[in-house]
Image (cartoon, coloured by chain):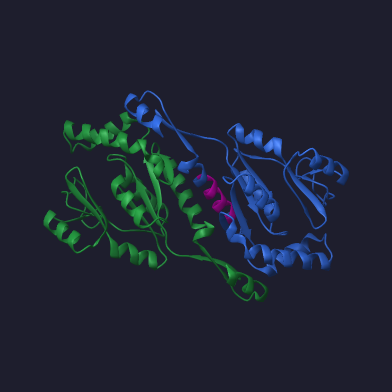
Chain colours: A blue, B green
Amino acid sequence: MAIELKRSGTLFVLVAPSGGGKSTVLRALLDRITDLSYSISVTSRPPRPGEVDGEDYSFVDIEAFQSMIERKEFYEWAQVHGNFYGTRRDAVEQMLADGKDVGMDLDVQGAYAVKGMKPDAVTVFLLPPSMETLEKRLRTRDTDDDDVIALRLRNAADEISRCRLFDYLVVNDDLDRVIDELAGVVTAERHKSLRQVLTVRDEPGLEGLLDQG
Amino acid sequence: MAIELKRSGTLFVLVAPSGGGKSTVLRALLDRITDLSYSISVTSRPPRPGEVDGEDYSFVDIEAFQSMIERKEFYEWAQVHGNFYGTRRDAVEQMLADGKDVGMDLDVQGAYAVKGMKPDAVTVFLLPPSMETLEKRLRTRDTDDDDVIALRLRNAADEISRCRLFDYLVVNDDLDRVIDELAGVVTAERHKSLRQVLTVRDEPGLEGLLDQG
């Protein structure tokens, strides 16, 4: 092939309200799209049952998290419902520079921060099928008392009302369908002309023309 | 479900140089995505062997085509290599208004015209894998003499040099892979937040918030 497309790495951000299922969806998406890289988040919150340090999150204590903030090691960080969450800047930037696409899941605050710093990041907002479903998911998680759940639901309603600030909207009802739709988003974004550099080999007529672009 | 997404129809335009295989690709895409509608083009050129009137094109004579131009019946029309090609405006607009997505294949001139009139149309440029492949395809078609083929190749080189004016770039080498990629583009565009209207039923807390959007 003499006409080829090349591009740098793209950052894909899954955004959802608390309880919106973004980590589950990201994990399934990484299983489907095996050349999508993942940068695990750092958090100061204690592991939930079943969560593994270095796999689900990098778990650190609050003091360690705060000194990482001071050393400006985070791409974005946020305090949500009393806990700190952050994404290490060096790791993500290195993967993108290497031409790797990176997937991450963030809360709405974190996604705003990343989109502000990297306007070419692709943001997908996962909508719950209904507020009732969202409440059920929060209760099933069984980690929060009623006051915290009520606060999360009020925040979620507010975040959903501004979901159109993000690039894509996907209703998170059936996991297989959601992954099909997200795989479509990744495929499409990989072919956006704005992300492409056209490479031409052994095409004397074209080389001159393409140098202009 | 109480939180739903609705949207109006989207126009998907496949663009390629002459001989770039856009009709073959569109036909395969319509087979894959069965809810994508198709508006056949009108042309004044004579049918090629195997082409069927009303299926591949609506074939008319030059006089009929010109009176359709005078009656402003075309969404876009162009004269390419001595033949007229056009897309009927009323048919496409009716399908989009009905909420149907429409696929069409156009030459570069036609795609410029449509994108100018409908900036939310999605344009995908099909790149040949090489100029050699393009020349082979033009010769296999066996309808043009050497002068016409040379002219088509010069035009193609010029069009390829400006391919980044279109929204997406796809290298047209393997048909199955191309259709996978185009299906991804259709899926992604269907989930763009800018195309969505959020509909909320029986969610008193959300209804008020979403009315603002």
Q: Which residues are magenta?
A: A177-187
Residue A184 sits inside the magenta stretch: yes
Figure check: A153 above or below A47: below
Which quadrant of the figure contains the C terminus of chain A?
Answer: top left
Residue at (86%, 46%) from the top-left corner? A62
For residue B2, above or below residue B20: below
- Residue A107 can be seen in this image: no
Give the answer, above or below, for where A200 lies relative to B169.
above
Residue B73's spot in the image, x, y percent?
A: 23, 62
Which is nearer the eye, A49 or B128? B128
The quadrant of the rendering that contains the N terminus of chain A is top left
Q: Quadrant of residue A172?
A: bottom right
The percent coordinates of residue B45 (x first, y second) are 17, 49
Q: Nearer the viewer, residue B184 or B81?
A: B81
Q: Is residue A60 left or right of residue A133?
A: right
Q: Is residue A182 magenta?
A: yes
**Left or right side of B85 for A161:** right
Outermost residue to the left: B63
Q: Does residue A1 appear left or right of residue A132 in this picture?
A: left
Q: Judge by depth and name the residue closer to the eye, B26 or A122.
A: A122
Question: How many numbered marks appear?
Answer: 0
**Quadrant assignment, res B178:** top left
- Main SS, magenta region, reads helix
User: Foreground: A185 or B33?
Assistant: A185
Residue located at (18% from left, 35% from top): B148
Q: Residue A103: x, y in percent?
A: 63, 44
**Residue B72 visible to the viewer:** yes
Give me the residue at 58% from left, 33% from top. Answer: A99
